[in-house]
Image (cartoon, helix red, strand yellow):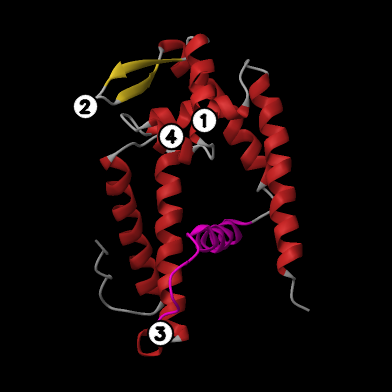
Amino acid sequence: MSTSPEALGLLVKTVQHRHHRALDGALGEVGISLVQWNALREIDRNPAASMHRLAELTFNSDQAFGTLAARLLRAGLIERRQGPGRVLAHVLTTRGEALLKEGADRHAAVLHASFAALSAGERDTLGRLLARLARPLSTGPAPDASSTLTPAQQANRDRIQGERETCRIQAQGQGLKGEAVQEAVTDCLSKVDLVVAKRMGCAQAAVPRP
C-alpha cells in the first residue's frame, strides 16, 4: 500500500517540527534562537548578498528579515558596510562569528542524533528524494510530447540533480563559501561519477560534469 501525499506531508512536517524544537533548545543554551543563528549562517555563507536574497535563504519575507537583521544589529552580532553601488552588505562581528561557531557544534549534534537511525545509504537516498521535491514547481505550459523525457532519462536527470544538491549541502556544511562551494560540488560529482562507473563495470572513469 502506497503512502498518501497527505501522510508524507505530515511526516515531513513532524520531523521539521522536532528539529526546530530540539535546535531551538540546544542553541538557546548559548543565548541565541534557531532563527537568529540561521540568519548568521546565511550572512556568513553569502557575503555581499542583498537583503532580499538573505530573506529568501532564511525562508523569511523581506519585511521579516529586515526586522530580524535590525535585532541582530542591536545585539552586536552583525554590522552593515557599504557594498557595490548603494547595496548595504551584512557581515558578522567578532561576537557574531563566535556564536555562529559555538552554535554549529550544537546544530550538528542535534541533526546527527536525529538521523542516526538511518544508514549512510539511506541518508543519501533521502537526500536525493528531498532535493528532487525541493525544486521549484513548474508553472509553465505542459511540455510538448516530442520533448518529453523517457522514464529512464527522467530518472537519470533526477539522480544528477539530487546528487548535485547533496554535494552542495555537504560543501556548505564544511564551511565553504562562494566559488569554493562550486569547486567542491564539481569535485564531489566527479567522485560520484567514478563510483557509478565502477558499479557498472566500466573500464574508464566517468568524465566530470561541468
Q: Which residue is mark 4?
A: 54
The quadrant holding residue 208 is bottom left
**Sequence-first tag of 4 and 3:** 4
Q: CA distance from mark 4 to mark 3?
A: 35 Å
Q: CA distance from mark 3 to mark 1?
A: 40 Å
Which residue corresponds to the image point at 45% horizontal and 69% vertical from the top-left? Answer: 159
Magenta highlight on residue 121:
yes
Position above or below: 23 against 119: above
Judge the density around disc 1: few (<14), some (14-19), many (≥20) Cα neighbours within 10 Å: few
Q: Which residue is mark 3?
A: 148
Of discs 3 and 2, which sits in the foreground? 2
Q: CA distance from mark 4 to mark 1?
A: 11 Å
Q: CA distance from mark 2 to mark 4?
A: 16 Å
Which residue corresponds to the image point at 35% horizontal and 73% vertical from the top-left? Answer: 197
Instruction: Give the amino acid at mark 1.
Output: Gln
Q: Secondary structure at mark 4?
A: helix
Label for residue 63? 1
Tell which of 191 and 21 is nearer to you: 21
The quadrant holding residue 60 is top right
- Measured as percent of width and height from the top left, residue 119 is found at 62, 57
Tell which of 123 and 141 is nearer to you: 141
Q: Secondary structure at mark 3?
A: loop
Q: Quadrant of the N terminus?
A: bottom right
- Measured as percent of width and height from the top left, residue 120 is found at 57, 56
Judge the density around disc 2: few (<14), some (14-19), many (≥20) Cα neighbours within 10 Å: few
